[in-house]
Image (spheres, rainbow, N blue to C red):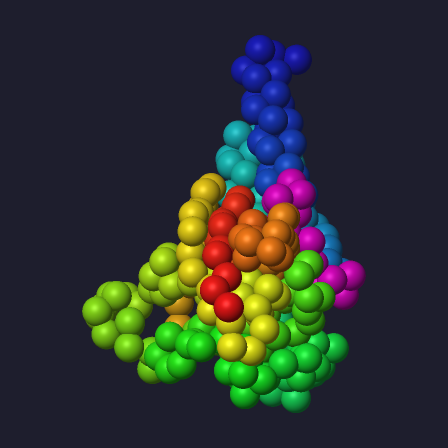
Amino acid sequence: MSPASSRRRSVAAVALVASISAVALPRCFLPAARHSQLSVLSDYRSSSLKHVLEIGSTATGGVGSLLGALAYAAAGTAAAVGGLTIGSRVVSRRSSDDDKDGEKQKWVGAEKLSALTASVGAGCMDNVEIAKILPHRYPFLLVDKVISVEKYKRAVGVKNVTANEPQFTGHFPERPIMPGVLMVEALAQLAGVVCMNPGDQVFFAGIDGVKFRKPVVPGDTLVMEVEVLKFREKSGIAKLSGRAYVDGKLAIEVKEFTCALVK
């Protein structure tokens, strides 16, 4: 066999391997598709590969020709591009279907959302009962409902933050955020529910270790909890800790604040 003929056969063999790889390999890099979709791609590529071999054989009389090798490579590239085009359409269609399914799953109606708070119930004190203990009134009554209370021990209460509250007129007009001092005040009022009786009055005597963890904005529900650390009933001095959450995330915590009760 002459050196020229040997080189032609080598080039033809390399081109054949490249064309087969071009048809077969793209499937490895496509995202996962359904079995039926993969069957379509497999059938398409099988017929394309058969067509490659037919073109290579008839173009110039067999594998031993350089022109035949080029025909192999060109046909293989065309088959690969066609396969990738079909694959991209399959993936695009599948993604579109998944997006539609996701939209249907995301929608939750008002009834189901409302049922999420059913276990909380009406609580043990509404704003009318709270007003019998606390002397605060609108716009400075910052506890809307008490969920549970253990007198002189602890309590859980709720403050519903709304855009109608006067502090948001100036704090801040373009981005309303509940002032941190009002969150502290709301915790102190809940502490008053724990320690006070009707007719009593409470004043701040000290505060320590306040940390604000996230902004509280109109539409949020501030769920507060206070716990009595020390209480001297004779002197009317109480030390408490407090924290409040929005959507299960800590918004504010107070390591210790001291209240003085005036009877």
Q: In which quarter of the image is residue 183?
A: bottom left
Q: In the image, which residues are magenta?
A: 25-37
* Magenta run includes residue 193: no
The residue closer to the viewer here, 38 or 183, is: 183
Decide if residue 237 is in sight here.
Answer: yes
State left or right for residue 218 relative to residue 187: left
In the figure, 39 relative to 112: above or below? above
Residue located at (54% from left, 87% from top): 128
Spot occupied by residue 235 in the image (x, y as percentages of width and height): 55, 54
State the quadrant of the N terminus: top right
In the figure, 89 relative to 58: above or below? below
Decide if residue 41 is in sight here.
Answer: no
Spot occupied by residue 150 in the image (x, y as percentages of width and height): 71, 66
The residue closer to the viewer here, 193 or 90, is: 193
State left or right for residue 3 relative to residue 208: right
Spot occupied by residue 214 in the image (x, y as percentages of width and height): 44, 54
Count how many numbered circles sit on residues in the image. 0
Spot occupied by residue 227 in the image (x, y as percentages of width and height): 63, 55
Residue located at (60% from left, 26% from top): 14
